[in-house]
Amino acid sequence: MYNTYNIPCEFQWNDVAFSITSSSLDLYHYHREGTGDPVDKKIISHSNQMLINPVEPLNTPKFLTQYLLIEMAQSMTIAPKMKKNVYLTFPLDLGVYFLEKADFKLIDVFTLASSKYTLYGDPRHGVLCKYWESPLFESPPTVLPCQEGVLQLNIYNSDSDWVEVHHVVLNAYGMKIFYNDATVTTTAMMEIRSKEVAETDFDELPPAEGMKKSIEVFHAKKLSVSSKKYLMEFGI
């Protein structure tokens, strides 16, 4: 599913159909339908390859925020000074790239997951977030790799009190996604500082050997990012 393909090619995933065909030398026609508005693009390139890989879940239906809020279906209470690895799911966007020698060009992003948004914090000072609800797992769950990924969340309660955790907010500019034939995954850290405050960040290392690193949309757009951490100040 996630791989490099020779052009021309056609795909059908669930209700989504897309294709890249060539009408003449170096002129290609890309078409997608079945999710969102239909997409038709003409592309001039020497390339004869395309790449499909999972990307940050913030680009559909359009980019509105860099923050992802994952609501835990069951809250978690953690004792003082405790560390624990838990697992959540997160939604996926799918990126389609043209490969041109050592370079790549993003030509389309779509999703098979639902797209919802929420406000984290109060209306004056809060931030808009992509919203996702997930069960809490003790081990990596089995998910549909074209729709959901698995987030390994390493939680550390540095506070001296018991703390109840309801959600995690992440700055997806720092999101590093890895994949293989069976799953898509990312790893994040959450340090709890008090009952209302926590800091989150992403790990840049693959969670297991043999996993491929996805080409991020933010990287493809060559965005300069000053900070990848996020300080949750409006409750956890």
Image (cartoon, rainbow, N blue to C red):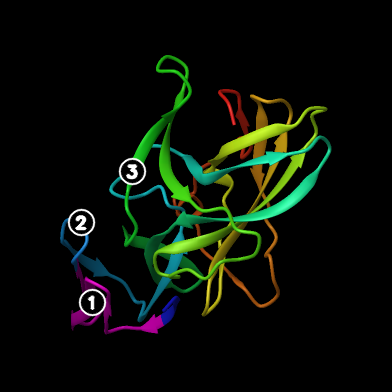
Q: Label 3 amino acid?
A: Lys
The C terminus: image quadrant = top right
N-term mark: 1 or 2: 1
Q: Residues within 10 Å of mark 1 (few under 14, many from 20)?
A: some
Residue 16 is at least partly visible in this image: yes
Mark 1 lies on residue: 19
Q: Is residue 20 magenta?
A: yes
Which circle's residue, 3 or 2, is located before the other in the chain? 2
Q: Is residue 76 left or right of residue 39?
A: right
**Quadrant position of residue 85:** bottom right
Give me the disc on residue 116.
3
Q: Which residues are magenta?
A: 5-32
Residue type indicated by callout 2: Gly
- Report x, y in % for residue 52: 40, 71
Report the mark closest to the observer, 1 or 2.
2
Q: Is residue 28 above or below residue 153?
A: below
Q: Is residue 169 magenta?
A: no
Question: In the image, residue 69 lies at what x, y percent?
Answer: 49, 40
Residue visible at 39% across and 82% down in the picture? 5
Q: Nearer the viewer, mark 3 or mark 2?
A: 3
Q: Nearer the viewer, residue 105 or 81?
A: 81
- Tell me, yes or no, whether the two marked residues, 3 and 2, touch with CB atoms within 8 Å: no
- Secondary element under disc 3, as helix, strand or loop, is strand
Q: Which mark is drawn over residue 36?
A: 2
Query: Cα distance, mark 1 to mark 2?
Result: 16 Å
